[in-house]
Image: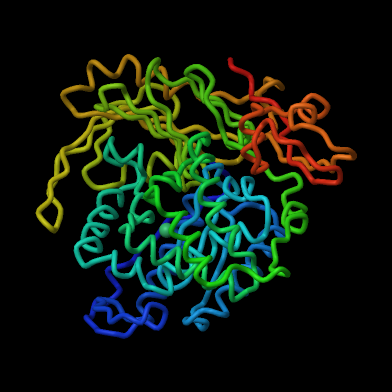
Amino acid sequence: MRHFRFPAVLSLSALLITIACTLNPATGQRQFTLIGEQQEIAMGREYAKSVEAEIGFYQDEKLQAYVQSIGKELASHTERPSLPWEFHVVDDPGVNAFALPGGYIFITRGILASFNSEAEMASVLGHEIGHVTARHSVEQLSRAQLAQLGLGVAMVASEDFRQYADLAQMGLGVLFLKFSRDDESQADQLGLRYLMRDHYQAEEMPKVFEMLKRQTEMAGGSRLPEWQSTHPSPEHRSAKLHRRIEKLGGSPPDALVRRDTYLEHLRGLVFGPDPREGYVAGRTFYHPQMAFRVDFPEGWKIVNQKQMVGALSPDRKAAIVLKLAQADDPGAAAQKFFNQSGVRKLGRRGRGFFDFQIDPSTDASGGSQPGARGSIAFVKHRNLVFQLVGYTSPGDFSSYSRVIRPAISSFRKLTDPAHLNVKPKRVQLIRVDRAMSLEAFDRKHPSSVSIEELALLNGIQPTDTLKSGTLIKRVVGREPPKN
Ligand SMILES: [Zn+2]
């Protein structure tokens, strides 16, 4: 959960769908598409807004500008140079990159930490650009998926009551369209084309895909699915790239790698989950940046999203959601909540603390909402009003109320400096002054990650010897307290 928040508005119903047959300039193939270029751009722009709201951009202007400049340079030499290309680093520890229709490309800070050259980054940007120039994502977003998306948005339209199962996913899945093996292979080919047009060393591309596969297996704490799951990676994928590079005659001797230029941009990069935005220790959720803590019921699954923190009972029948209320004080927030149609107050249990019932209803399209019963608390903290709501089906409330009520009334100001002052881990760079093994480097400059992970981050093996004068990454910083 973060301080900055905007409602994610997807108004896709406003986009008209037409059928067209066009010749794709990148692939040379005829494509039947439901969506014209202007619509493609409008759609991408809408999704991009929700990426910013739900995941957020990484706060480092220099790094953002760098990624943007490399990405735009690559895109300017493609078959669709006039798209409104945008490249953003999203604040996520996972290892991933994804493209939205219209030229909106996102890359995680987690994947950036694992690259070791500008050519490696350009390989992944080129691959994602390939998905856009070949219009893969537009094709994927079929009429059916659009309809489904509309439904999903309607379901979460009442922000207070997401279906329990949605808590774990929060509708981000739709951004990660699974491409077919053919699409992936085509994006690899196009990516390679763009990489070579910008005079990068082509051999960096198959290497980076092999590395990412290893890297993904180690990553964790992401709000997004991992690269590997969104990019099915058949065994022969990098072999295929190698063969293609050979056929193209390889890279010229002066092809660009730009190792140090790239690495210099990673100095101080946040590594792994950022505990300042909230973390769980035991059954307590701590939010150092906003200085509060909440004790959730024992055994519940806690999900920390950008705009809310959710907890789901083990049987997935009950949920607790903590978020900011759009009101100046708890009284106004409560009034707003109970003014919603179908929401009834069952009783006041304390200051800003109520039981409520939501009556079953049928919406315009004939879908039925099952109704819910729960408790809600409104708390003012640091000039913000927080809303904690615990709910389940009306029939199950009597058994869940004994864990829901204590949880939603456990919101406290966080004062313990051990939790308040936690810091994220960060990437540091050290130029080795003499040849040494990575193990010796790790003894001299200890990292807070394992030697295997350190080797992966540096794109080498733990037993490899580092040449004198090489820039090497290490990770510094500690885990937040466990209780
Ligand atoms: Zn892909």
Q: Quadrant of residue 74?
A: bottom right
Q: Is 50 situated above or below 376?
A: below
Does residue 172 appear in this view?
A: no
Q: Position of residue 249 (x, y in %)?
A: 56, 71
Residue at 24% x, 83% y: name it: 20
Picture quarter containing residue 315?
Answer: top left
The residue at the far right in this view is 433
Q: Quadrant of the C terminus?
A: top right
Q: Foreground residue, 53 or 115? A: 115
Q: Could you tell me residue 396's position as x and y percent?
A: 20, 22
Q: Is residue 336 visible?
A: yes
Q: Position of residue 404 (x, y in %)?
A: 35, 21
Drawn side of residue 235 relative to residue 477, left or right: left
Q: Is residue 157 above or below residue 163?
A: below
- Residue drawn 55% across and 69% down? 86
Rendered position, 79 above or below 244: below
Q: How many marks?
A: 0
Expressed as whole percent of the image width and height from the top left, the position of residue 286 reads: 57, 27
Describe residue 91's horizontal placement relative to residue 368 as left or right. right
Q: Residue at x 64, y 39 (%)?
A: 271
| Rendering colour mode | rainbow
For residue 22, side relative to residue 208 (left or right): left
Location of ligand 1 given as a quarter of the image: bottom left
Which residue corresponds to the image point at 45% horizontal and 54% vertical from the top-left? 239
Decide which of 445, 281 is in the foreground and name it. Answer: 445
In front of the other: 279 or 66 = 66
